[in-house]
Image (spheres, coloured by chain):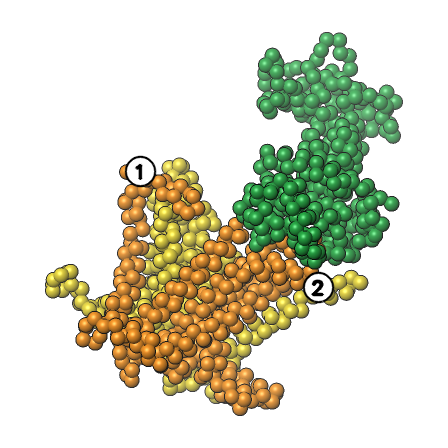
Chain colours: A yellow, B green, C orange
Amino acid sequence: MKFLYRLRNFPFWSWLWFIIGALYFILPLLATFEFSLSWDPAIPWKAYQRAFEDNDFWETFIYSNVLAVATIFFSVLLVVPTAYWIRLRLPQARRIVEFITLMPFVVPAIILVFGLIRIYSSPFTIPFTDIQLMQPLTNFKMGTNILIVAGYTVLAMPYMYRSVDTGMRTVDIATLTEAAQSLGASWYVIITKIILPNIRSALLSGALLTFAIVVGEVTLASFLGVDAFGPYLFLLGQHRAYEPAALSFVSFLLTWFAMGMIQMVTGGQGQAQGAH
Amino acid sequence: MAYLSISKVTKQFGDTVVVDNFNLDIEKGEFVSFLGPSGCGKTTTLRMVAGFELPTSGQIFLDGVDITDKSPNQRNVGMIFQSYALFPNMTVEQNIGFGLTVRKLEKDVIKQRVDEMVRLIHLEKHAHKYPYQLSGGQQQRVSLARALANRPQVLLLDEPLSALDAKIRVSLRSEIRAIQKSLGITAIFVTHDQEEALSISDRIVVMNVGEMEQVGTPFEIYNFPKTRFVANFVGSLNTAEAQVLDPANGLLTMDGIQLQTHEGIIGKKKGDKVTFAIRPERFSFVAEGKKENLLEGTVINITFLGSVVRIQMQIGNSTFNMDTFNRPSLELPKIGEKCQVTCSTKAVLILEG
Amino acid sequence: MAQTAITPQGKIYPPTNWKTWLGVAPFFIFAILFLFLPSLRLFTASFTDPEGNFTLNNIIQLFSEKYIVDAYKLSIQISAVTALGGGILGFLLAYSVTVGGLPKSLRSILITFSGVASNFAGVPLAFAFVATIGRQGFMTHILRDYFGMDIYEAGFNLYSFAGLSLVYMYFQFPLMVLIMAPALDGLKKEWREAAENLGASTAQYWLKVAMPVLLPSILGAMILLFGNAFGAYATAYALTGGRIGVVTIQIGAQIRGDVLYNPGLGYAMAIGMVVIMAISLAGYSWLQAKTERWLK
């Protein structure tokens, strides 16, 4: 009778859904991996060797990583003080700022990039005069870099802001600050010893998400004409077969690594949401 | 056989015994409280009566029917949760009518019963509101009405007042008791609050780590605790150890101080160790002419508790609390001073464990 | 002057002056420079002809040119289908690891995988699906050789509506899992117990309590999924090279294309997209507020 009771409680449907989901997840990865190994049966890793031998791969990949780091740095600089100030002094601004951080959802990458190009491909002039302050950002390398990092910062904003704000809410940063102030701590001490250590896992999770978004990004990179990893992989796919499969699999592992790290640092609270 | 009979019920989670050989007979219309600290098995026992947990062994009978293996929705047992557990998507009326709706009763029967219940809990003005628009006390009353609407055979209350403010707690507790009495419904009330259990129950079951420590009326539990655990948990009695000096005449010695009990000590011989208890309010400052139970001690601390003043004293090697009424004319000793207190021979209780 | 601001929740905030607002100024300046001005410029550009004069032509074309209307239709269809499909599968998965009785360890595996997959888009995703169910794909072969099912013979094509939907689903249903898992956690165990205690069957509990409580979250999440698919560009482009004319690809082609080239029209299409996305976001926020009110 106990056995029958057990059997009645066996979550058959749950297992079924889980297995269907797991297959959906795994089969494409398995297929990609299998394909990447099938170039030359004698040398299964040939596709990986070839892909890693290509100088362009390393150049674009490193460049994308630099862009990711710059984006993370800039996002943190922009989002952390803002979120902190709102928690501490300006709760009125919460709604409007949250609304703004949701805007990238309304203005997807493909639209954002044309807007950016439209504005920053014309020179900066003093309003109502023809005096030129600066040439268009799109005309020189550094300008394009600034533009693309700004664009990525916009794309990453919903994730970064939500992650940091949740982190600050969980530790009740406003009370912590007041406690530190009442104990005579300076602002420097408050920021370095109280705030940053307490939102470390939130920061890390936001940073890794940003990393996952930026490294393989195609839309902004290709329309702004920068030689990033995303467009490289795209071009490679146009005329090669096995190397792109190998690199796709590698980039999956990288994303997985980033997400696994988020899980580890946040204990499963990390919230990732799609960005395309 | 009693109306509700819990017979030799044991519950294990893995290797942990949560409820150990629980036996209790409850009469129809009786209000019984399970009192104990968290983890004592009181909630688990209640959940076995409701059907949310299966006993590892033992049986539960309700009105002569074995309900041990029945699923929760086949028992006619009402349950009140600490967190109210009102359905957030339904109004007060819909919540109360839920049990009747799933039983597919006729519309006008449901309507009539719901109206009756809404009147019973005095929420006529809030009948169309959603739970989030109500206060905690109101929500718990709705939950009570929802459980009663099904006309359950037994009402189970799992710490229903714990989430509420102190004042609401007291008023709602008397309301629950009044409704229970007027409907003549059998009820089991789980709580960790001894005052709550004492004030509301016909009978109290004091539980500790899965076992029943003592079963009795509030009067018995409060005045004649049988074990050290009950003495400490109910009303914070002073407990200490002593040696038996003369069992027949009820004479004890504690660190050289003699204590006299009202009756002889049964089943003990000279030199045996016993635990005794004295209620704090049974002490008084020494009046002239007292001969037995004269205790001299040093005052360690004095605390004002409103109507009562609690004086903590070192007597022998043990610490005792003495409660005395707070009168404007009260003359208190100072901390560090020695003073003599006394208690009647009836106040010295010998405990079993 | 000391002012107190009262929010809709009736909370009273301490008085602030303009200096307090300076703290969030960098954020606002950034948002204006890189979010609002670009969007605004696209808006004005969509009312401009190639010579720089004001025109309503682009907007009129949005509704009159068949291939543009078709592009919107296609995008809306594909987004709706994948939001619904991904939504249902994602919900069932989230259910299985939260209240469905699967072991706890599977939950964190699923959540991690969902985090990966919802961010796994664009070129690598397209390659992965070509390798899986392309003409020479891994599964295509397995299905043909072991199950006797030739899916291409049966009319399936990866570079079609069905194929693209299948690919989009890969990032759609994990997103649903990520949103729904916390929402399902919000279902209190006591609700189920109370329902059972009052005589309800499992089906009655789901029908009358759990589903109504979850419905705003489910709909809200599906709207988010809709927008997620609607704005996708890289995946569609990498997979089909522009052969399937979803709106994002048409916009790219109008502004940067070799064959079609009419930036003004492209900008107008972009604005059309923003409007649709804004409507979905508004719906999402509305449902979100409704859920929060209930579950407070």
Outermost residue, front direction?
Answer: B108
Relative horizontal placement of residue A105, taking residue B163 as reference (left or right): left
Image quarter of the N terminus of chain B: top right
Residue linked to disc 2 = A9
Relative horizontal placement of residue C191, taking residue B294 as reference (left or right): left
Q: Looking at the image, which is closer to me, A53 or A96?
A: A96
Residue at 47%, 55% (x, y): give it: C289
Outermost residue, bottom direction?
Answer: C153
Helix, strand or loop at disc 1?
A: loop
Q: Looking at the image, which is closer to me, A204 or B39?
A: B39
Using the image, determine if residue C239 lies above or below residue B5. below
Q: Nearer the viewer, mark 2 or mark 1?
A: 1
Residue at 31%, 55% (x, y): give it: C27
Using the image, determine if residue B249 lies above or below residue C244. above
Image quarter of the C terminus of chain B: top right
Residue linked to disc 1 = C2
Residue C156, label in figure: none
Using the image, determine if residue B8 lies above or below residue B332. below
Residue kind at label 1, given as amino acid type = Ala
Residue kind at label 2, given as amino acid type = Asn
Q: CA distance from mark 2 to mark 1?
A: 63 Å
Q: Residue C235 at x, y = what percent?
A: 41, 76
Mark 1 nearby-residue class (10 Å; few <14, some 14–19, many ≥20): few
* Pointer 2 with pointer 1, Cβ within 8 A: no
Q: Residue A7 at x, y = what percent?
A: 73, 66
Residue C123 in view in this figure: no
Residue at 86%, 23% (x, y): give it: B264
Residue at 45%, 61% (x, y): give it: C284
Q: Looking at the image, which is closer to me, B318 or A28?
A: A28
Chain ID, mark 1: C
Residue C288 in view in this figure: yes
Mark 2 nearby-residue class (10 Å; few <14, some 14–19, many ≥20): few
